[in-house]
Image (tube, helix red, strand yellow):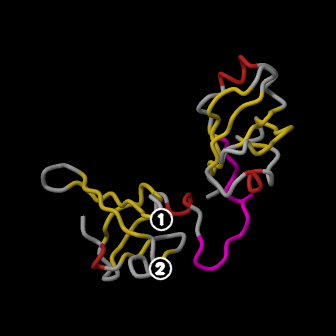
Amino acid sequence: MDRPVTLAAVTGAHGVTGEVRLKLFGEGVAALKRYRAFNDSSLTVSKLKDDGKGGAIARFAEVTDRTAAEKMRGTALTVPRSTMPALEEGEYYYADLLGLPAVSDEGEALGICIAVDNFGAGDVIEIECSAGEDGKKRRFMVPMTPAAVPEWDADRLVITAAFAQP
């Protein structure tokens, strides 16, 4: 499935000529410069530069003034997954993990990956389990390390039983 992957989001207008500020979710401005069009080609980049604060400033051909730029606040900039660079062994895109079923290394169904976070010490996946007897869904988090998640592919995440504690 070639689902869209979010690379940045518009955080507001910059100046009066239609430029916007971007919050980046990838590896900086250089990674974003690979792409000229976003959101199914509805936004075409005509200018992109580093803002010196970990974000970027962009101009889109379709946005010509500050009012239009302000209306873009909150807009996610996406590209199709198929346009992203190939990965090395052991690497993954967060978008590839989201929605994957999780099973224990003993074959027990655990739930679905609903989030991937990074709080500074490495990636952590969040698994949502089926509703229990009380009708409430449970969630648990697992570090995305070889000890906790020894294998994954396009069909599932395998979680070591010791880490599979909802």
Q: Amino acid at mark 1?
A: Asp
The segment highlighted magenta reads 77-91
Q: Residue tagged by mark 1?
A: 123
**Residue 120 visible in image:** yes
Q: Secondary structure at mark 1?
A: strand
Q: Amino acid at mark 2?
A: Glu
Is residue 67 positioned above or below 119 on the image?
Answer: above
Q: Which corner quadrant holds the C terminus?
A: bottom left
Q: Dot 2: within a 10 Å radius of its alpha carbon, few (fewer than 14), some, or many (20 or more) residues?
A: some
Quadrant hosting residue 56: top right
Q: Which residue is pictured at 47% across the width and 59% down the height?
A: 118
Q: Which residue is pictured at 66% across the width and 22% down the height?
A: 70
Q: Which residue is pictured at 42% across the width and 76% down the height?
A: 149
Q: Dot 1: within a 10 Å radius of its alpha carbon, few (fewer than 14), some, or many (20 or more) residues?
A: some
Check residue 106 for magenta coloring: no
Is residue 32 positioned above or below 46 on the image?
Answer: below
Q: Residue tagged by mark 2?
A: 151
- Residue 87 point in image, percent of width and height: 67, 72
- Residue 158 point in image, percent of width and height: 41, 76
- Residue 59 point in image, percent of width and height: 80, 33
**Residue 116 visible in image:** no
Q: What's the mark number on residue 111? A: none
Q: Which residue is pictured at 67% across the width and 39% down the height?
A: 22
- Residue 81 point in image, percent of width and height: 67, 57
Q: Which corner quadrant holds the N terminus?
A: bottom right
Q: Circles 2 and 1: CB distance less than 8 Å?
A: no
Q: In the figure, is residue 10 to the left or right of 120? A: right
Is residue 69 positioned above or below 58 on the image?
Answer: above
Quadrant hosting residue 18: top right
For this rendering, which residue is in front, 8 or 79? 8
